[in-house]
Image: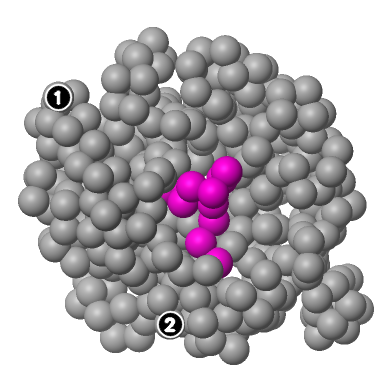
């Protein structure tokens, strides 16, 4: 397989910097690092807390972000797909992308794309058992809000030289079809809104854009569309491809400590199933792990029957098992001529799914990507290897 034939893209969760709305809700100087710092083992064999090897960095610092970009490309990550938020008529958590990533991306030949994370924002930072989870913001948008949000996306990002394109078309992903339909008022208005987005993008110099839908939100969150409904909707709404955000959206974890291999076996079957379920290309997802326990109050009993963020976890994540998933997805890519593989995630630390180095495995997860797929074309491999040692001393 030619390394240029497939793009390896990791989802990027931008909540590790100070944001005014977070300070309003959680206190002065708050970032999601606070949850990670307070995490504790909740049962025998529970690997918490997870500690970042490079410290609790401010991702909105351009120098910090440049280090992340160089580290990613040196280990085979071609692009970050930023979780992007629009609440109450304005952006949220945009600073790492706009102030730190975009000025640095072209230096290291790294791409970026947007996944509009249009879900409700609930206060699970952390969630106290036996209290209602407060909704901080709604992810639903009406037609005017949709136009405002997507105008911002088109004008601010799509013309950037580092924006990810598939066959020359800017790649734009939408997280929740359910929320999109609820806000816009059904299939007809949603189709009209998406067609309007394409027309406005064309006027802005993008004759065609690549619209991607994230497959159903699944059993972990108790939401999502029936598979056959979703496949039909993808066609009716005019999406160009489908992918996934994380394995647990699709495949149930039957035990508190669910083995990684059990999830991988389900995911591998899912890649094949989804590749025939949809009439558009399905881009497979590889997930590093799953453990949202840092988002719960640590003194509470950890009870997966309560639902997210109390869930079963993937209990035995290791770089070696992650490598196995990469080998299997490479085989799928080669057999199906797939253009894109998504990875959850670069930095979902408080959900236990991250490529970034920690004090337990160092850069072990990243090394597996480089080993299986090779480093990203044009990456500064030797320079970054000296700056960030690959293994713990």
Residue lying at 23% horizontally and 74% vertically, measured from the top left: 21
- Magenta-tinted stretch: 162-172
Q: Is residue 47 visible?
A: yes
Say left or right for 90 vs 331. Answer: left
Q: Is residue 167 magenta?
A: yes
Residue at mark 1: 188
Foreground pick, 1 / 133: 1
Q: Residues within 10 Å of mark 2 (few under 14, many from 20)?
A: some
Residue lying at 55% horizontally and 67% vertically, measured from the top left: 162
Say left or right for 299 vs 108. Answer: left
Residue at mark 2: 99
Which image quarter holds the N terminus? top right
Q: How far is mark 1 from mark 2, CA to CA?
A: 37 Å
Foreground pick, 88 / 235: 235
Find residue 360 and report its horizontal and vertical position in percent.
78, 64
Find residue 112 and report its horizontal and vertical position in percent.
53, 61
Marks 1 and 2, the one that precedes in the sequence? 2
Find residue 116 and report its horizontal and vertical position in percent.
35, 51
Say left or right for 302 vs 361. Answer: left
Q: Residues within 10 Å of mark 1 (few under 14, many from 20)?
A: few
- Against 390, residue 200 (above or below) is above
Which marked residue is nearer to the observer: mark 1 or mark 2?
A: 1
Q: Is residue 41 visible?
A: no
């Amino acid at each position: 397989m030619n390394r240029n034939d497939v793009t390896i893209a990791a989802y990027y969760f931008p909540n590790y910097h100070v944001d005014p709305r977070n300070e309003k809700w959680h206190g002065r100087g708050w970032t999601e690092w606070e949850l990670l710092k307070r995490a504790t083992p909740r049962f025998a064999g529970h690997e918490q807390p997870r500690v970042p090897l490079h410290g609790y960095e401010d991702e909105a610092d351009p120098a910090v972000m440049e280090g992340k970009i160089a580290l990613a490309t040196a280990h085979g990550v071609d692009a970050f797909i930023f979780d992007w938020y629009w609440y109450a008529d304005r952006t949220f958590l945009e600073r790492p992308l706009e102030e730190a990533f975009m000025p640095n991306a072209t230096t290291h030949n790294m791409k970026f794309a947007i996944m509009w994370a249009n879900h409700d924002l609930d206060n699970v930072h952390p969630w106290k058992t036996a209290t209602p989870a407060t909704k901080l913001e709604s992810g639903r948008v009406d037609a005017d809000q949709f136009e405002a949000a997507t105008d911002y996306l088109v004008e601010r990002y799509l013309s950037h030289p580092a924006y990810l394109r598939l066959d020359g078309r800017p790649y734009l992903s939408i997280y929740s079809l359910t929320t999109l339909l609820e806000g816009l008022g059904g299939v007809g208005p949603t189709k009209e809104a998406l067609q309007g987005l394409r027309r406005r993008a064309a006027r802005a110099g993008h004759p065609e854009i690549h619209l991607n839908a994230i497959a159903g939100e699944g059993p972990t969150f108790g939401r999502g569309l029936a598979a056959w409904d979703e496949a039909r909707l993808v066609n009716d709404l005019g999406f160009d491809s489908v992918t996934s955000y994380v394995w647990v959206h699709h495949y149930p974890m039957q035990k508190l400590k669910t083995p990684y291999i059990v999830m991988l076996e389900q995911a591998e079957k899912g890649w094949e199933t989804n590749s025939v379920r949809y009439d558009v290309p399905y881009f497979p997802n590889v997930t590093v792990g799953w453990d949202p326990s840092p988002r719960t109050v640590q003194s509470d009993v950890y009870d997966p029957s309560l639902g997210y963020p109390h869930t079963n976890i993937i209990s035995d994540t290791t770089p070696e098992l992650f490598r196995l998933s990469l080998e299997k997805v490479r085989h799928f890519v080669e057999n199906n001529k797939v253009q894109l593989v998504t990875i959850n995630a670069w930095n979902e630390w408080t959900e236990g799914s991250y490529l970034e180095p920690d004090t337990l495995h160092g850069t072990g997860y990243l090394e597996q990507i480089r080993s299986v797929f090779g480093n990203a074309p044009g990456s500064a491999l030797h320079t970054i290897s000296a700056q960030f040692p690959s293994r713990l001393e």
